[in-house]
């Protein structure tokens, strides 16, 4: 998030952690657009189950499979987002806005941001 001054060379970038970084991941139009693209990509294969889609997102975001508890939480999250968007009749597993919200949440997870 700290870009170097473009008028000179920089041998090593500064390391910082400021609240603006979290705000960028939450609100920046680029991040929101990337969440939309990721959700569309995940939903593009109609033959996949919900669990397979969730597993794919975890593999892409964290390079690991989700735990059973995480999968259960994601399924509940998708259902709650459908209600939040006011579309109580829609299936939470095919409703794109719910998957966009999930992608955005995963982008903001500490595991996505920090390397162990």
Image: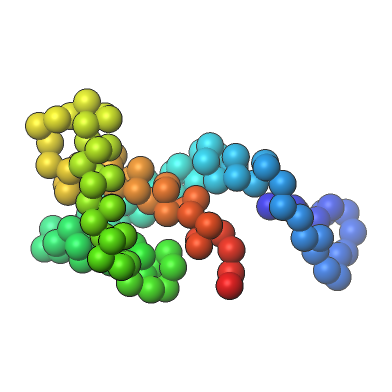
105 or 4: nearer the eye? Answer: 105
Residue 23, quarter of the rendered image: top right
x 26%, y 29%: residue: 85
Where is 104 relative to 9, above or below?
above
The quarter of the image holding the C terminus is bottom right
Residue 92, quarter of the rendered image: top left
Residue 32 in the image, given as x and y percentages of width and height: 45, 42
Left or right? Give the position of 23 relative to 73: right
Residue 14 in the image, given as x and y percentages of width and height: 81, 60
Q: Say if residue 47 shows up in the picture.
A: yes
The furthest residue to the top: 86
Left or right? Give the position of 62 relative to 24: left
x 28%, y 53%: residue: 73
Q: How is the image coloured?
A: rainbow
Residue 93 in the image, given as x and y percentages of width and height: 17, 48
Left or right? Give the position of 85 relative to 34: left
The furthest residue to the front: 69
Left or right? Give the position of 106 relative to 45: right
x 27%, y 30%: residue: 84
Tally of numbered discs: 0
The furthest residue to the right: 8
């Amino acid at each position: 998030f700290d870009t170097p001054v473009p008028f000179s060379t920089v041998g090593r970038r500064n390391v910082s952690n400021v609240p603006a970084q979290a705000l960028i991941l939450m609100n920046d139009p680029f991040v929101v657009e990337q969440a939309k693209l990721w959700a569309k990509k995940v939903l593009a294969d109609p033959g996949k189950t919900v669990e397979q889609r969730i597993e794919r997102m975890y593999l892409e975001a964290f390079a690991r499979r989700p735990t059973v508890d995480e999968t259960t939480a994601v399924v509940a999250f998708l259902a709650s987002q459908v209600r939040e968007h006011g579309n109580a009749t829609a299936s939470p597993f095919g409703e794109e806005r719910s998957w966009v919200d999930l992608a955005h949440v995963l982008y903001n997870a500490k595991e996505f941001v920090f390397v162990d």
